[in-house]
Image (cartoon, grey):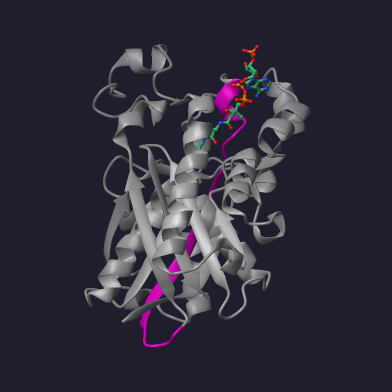
Amino acid sequence: MNVRITGTGSALPGKILTNAELEQLIDTTDEWITTRTGIKERRIAADGEYTSTFAAEAARRALAMAGIQPEELDLIILGTVTPDFPFPSTACIVQDLLGATNATAFDLSAACSGFIFGLSIAEKYIRTGAARKVLVIGAEILSRIVDWEDRNTCVLFGDGAGAVILEGSEGDHSLLSTHTFSNGEYWNLLYQQGSGSRNPATDSRTLDERRIYLAMAGNDVFKHAVRGMEEAAVKALDANGLTSSDISLMIPHQANRRIIDATAKRLGVDSDRVFVNLHHYGNTSSASIPIALDEANRQGTLKPANKILLVAFGGGFTYGSALIDW
Ligand code: COA
């Protein structure tokens, strides 16, 4: 059984926060942010908007494109590090919002690689016959876990969601492979310090000592990200007997323009074959690849039989790739 992407969707908050607006909030400049990251603006969720809000909307758009009803879904996998609640899973809330009454639903924690890890699990469910129609979502509201007083991190992240529908298929055009990797040795280079069992939200010190927020060793993460994305991409190419010249479009995790450029250069993929939209959205973690995939799809950039390479890297560390014969 092959696995085909039959629908894509994305949803973003309406509020745009520009670099110029950030200049008014913290000690930074548009010039610094643009040259170090490529980011010009990001979307920020409003009061009353949650991770499930955007996840469900992205899912509705993907379902509409696939032409299937929510009740037909067998499985919902949602990658996120910013769930609505620690439990129950945001996937269960999305199941309820959609009315996907026949689906099993769970969240997956693989930070910025969450969508690729989700694809990999969905692929295996479908190939083994355990599921026929699967919804995979990446959704985040990172603006609620970044420290808005820390200019090293708060300029980098944004909110949003992307989703795909995967279905079993006898046809040729399909998901060719997925590969996932983890390196737990570096878990503390990029993590949310508080609200879990080590620094519980119930302990007043967690807030008082600003331990609730996302923490990152930016320089170290940068180097590992380039190496990890290259390794994951090479694995995908080798597994399919392809070289980088066969790739029509690479859609990398949108963390930093310099990470993307360095990865593409190492792989030998020219910039005109690399999809970039982080200037609009910043780093939306697990949502970045499905948002980009949906944009590329709706723009008509993806043509039948194109080889599309998705590659991600994130906290954990986690990293991974997916190769699609569109
Ligand atoms: N505005 C202005 N100056 C800033 C700033 C900001 N928003 N953030 C940091 N700086 C300052 C620092 O304080 C430092 O000043 P100092 O030299 O006086 O101490 C200076 O800029 C240089 O900092 P440095 O950390 O060397 O910058 P950098 O070139 O490594 O870029 C990142 C920083 C965070 C952009 C970069 O390391 C990065 O992108 N890392 C990967 C992050 C990422 O993508 N993580 C997610 C992966 S999934």
Q: Is residue 42 above or below residue 151?
A: below
Please state if 208 lies on the left or on the right of 33 as rendered: left
Evaluate whether residue 96 shows in this view.
no
Residue 154 in the magenta stretch? The answer is yes
| Residue 89 percent coordinates (x, y) | 29, 50
Q: At 31% from the left edge and 30% from the top edge, which residue is drawn?
A: 185
Direction bottom: furthest residue: 170
Q: At 34% from the left edge and 12% from the top edge, which residue is drawn?
A: 205
Q: At 44% from the left edge and 85% from the top edge, which residue is drawn?
A: 172
Q: Is residue 33 above or below residue 257?
A: above
Q: Quarter for ligand 1?
A: top right
Magenta segment boundaries in residue numbering: 151-172
| Residue 58 percent coordinates (x, y) | 51, 62
| Residue 191 percent coordinates (x, y) | 39, 30
Residue 38 in the magenta stretch? The answer is no
Q: At 40% from the left edge and 12% from the top edge, which residue is drawn?
A: 208
Frontmost residue, 180 versus 93? 180
Please state if 91 lies on the left or on the right of 231 as rendered: left
Please state if 120 lies on the left or on the right of 249 as rendered: left
| Res. 95 image quadrant | bottom left
What is the quadrant of the N terminus in the image?
A: bottom left
Frontmost residue, 41 versus 126? 126
| Residue 8 percent coordinates (x, y) | 52, 69
Please state if 74 lies on the left or on the right of 154 as rendered: left
Q: Is residue 316 above or below residue 60?
A: above
Evaluate whether residue 235 shows in this view.
yes
